Image (cartoon, rainbow, N blue to C red):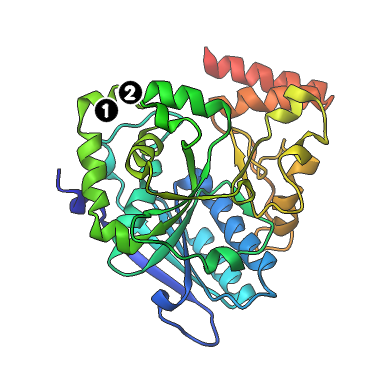
Amino acid sequence: MDYKQLTKFKDIIELDRRSIKRADRDTFNISWGIDKNYQVGAAISIASILENNKHYDIDFTFHIIADYLDDEYLSLLTKLAEQYKTVIKVYHIDSEPLSSLPKTNIWPVSIYYRLLSFDYFSERLDNLLYLDADITCKGSLLELSQLEFDEEEYGAVVIDVESMQDKSATRLNNPDFKGNYFNSGVMYINLRNWLRCKLTERFFELLSNDEVVRNIKYPDQDILNIMFLHHAKILPREYNAIYSLKSEFEFKDKQYYKSFINDNTVFIHYTGVTKPWHDWANYPSSIFFRRVYEISPWRLIPYQSAARKHEYREKYKHLLYQNKIISGMFTAIKYNLMKG
């Protein structure tokens, strides 16, 4: 496989509203990889970083790799860049060359955009923070921006939740993963080592190994874990506080989220089907996203309604828990019609 053929950008759009320009390499670079369903997530992720770091001396450059763009989204991103006097670079990728890679309905081809970020920027930058688009910032990135790597470290990551450790060690047939298996939603990559150690080539070598692929469940995350084992700096939980809004109706405790999100939390990772930009996610735990949303260029746009089958399935359960019985029943009927 010629992996260089996978990174095909139809266009690169630079939205630069800074008063003083700086070279990308001299700034703190952060990237996202998204499809249409995660547009608003990436935008508010950017806004949350800027809003919570406006009193710190950090120059950011933001990069969005997207397989779908429209005029409205670019217009809103332009307003966001203007609001915070920042720079947002948008890379319109051709996703077709990636269509042959392993994927599922839950894990679309856009999961590989983080890999393409590491490869593409490794020839242009020294370090890159990659974030999933369902991550909201609520703290300072000053300490992270000053982090240094040694020559053996490929990057800095946060260990995944406890329930993933034994399962991952068993699945990947290596006990060393227990206590070391990380979540790939937050990865601060040492791009100099990525380039020097030819990690893109290594990724695709593993992905083409039938014995490896037979054991993986999360296509990109599992392979990244195999590559990074014993080569990663471990960041504390506050840099990837994993919380699922599904917990709201499962545990029926509106204060439950405080066990995961606290005063020290820097990044909240809203995993699962329900995201804080969904119109049924009206919980105190969503406030960290929604406070920023309401002061962003998106504030006049309603929160998103369910569109896909798995969203309807989750939405009706939330509505019933919220005692919105009639709308919950209608949503359940809609889900069952889609299921049939």
Question: Taking 71 as reference, is 283 left or right?
Answer: right
Disc 2 is placed on an element classified as loop
- Mark 1 residue crowding within 10 angstroms, few (<14) / some (14–19) / many (20+): some
**Label annotation for residue 212:** 1
- Mark 2 residue crowding within 10 angstroms, few (<14) / some (14–19) / many (20+): some
Which residue is most to the bottom? 20
Q: Is residue 48 visible?
A: yes
**At 61% from the left edge and 78% from the top edge, which residue is drawn?**
57
Question: Taking 115 as reference, is 53 left or right?
Answer: right
**Label annotation for residue 215:** 2
> Residue 39: x and y, percent?
52, 51
Picture layout, residue 163 above or below residue 229:
above
Q: Quadrant of residue 255?
A: top right
Question: Taking 59 as reference, is 207 left or right?
Answer: left
**At 71% from the left edge and 29% from the top edge, which residue is drawn?**
247
Disc 1 is placed on an element classified as helix
Picture layout, residue 76 above or below residue 179:
below
Residue nearest the observer in this picture, 38 or 308: 38
Q: Is residue 282 visible?
A: no
Q: Amino acid at mark 2?
A: Asn
> Residue 105: x and y, percent?
43, 28
> Residue 171: x and y, percent?
39, 22
Picture layout, residue 27 above or below residue 334:
below
Which residue is most to the top? 340
Contact, mark 1 vs mark 2 (Cβ under 8 Å): yes
> Residue 108: x and y, percent?
40, 36
**At 27% from the left edge and 36% from the top edge, which residue is drawn?**
101
> Which quadrant, please, contains the N terminus?
top left
Q: Amino acid at mark 1?
A: Val
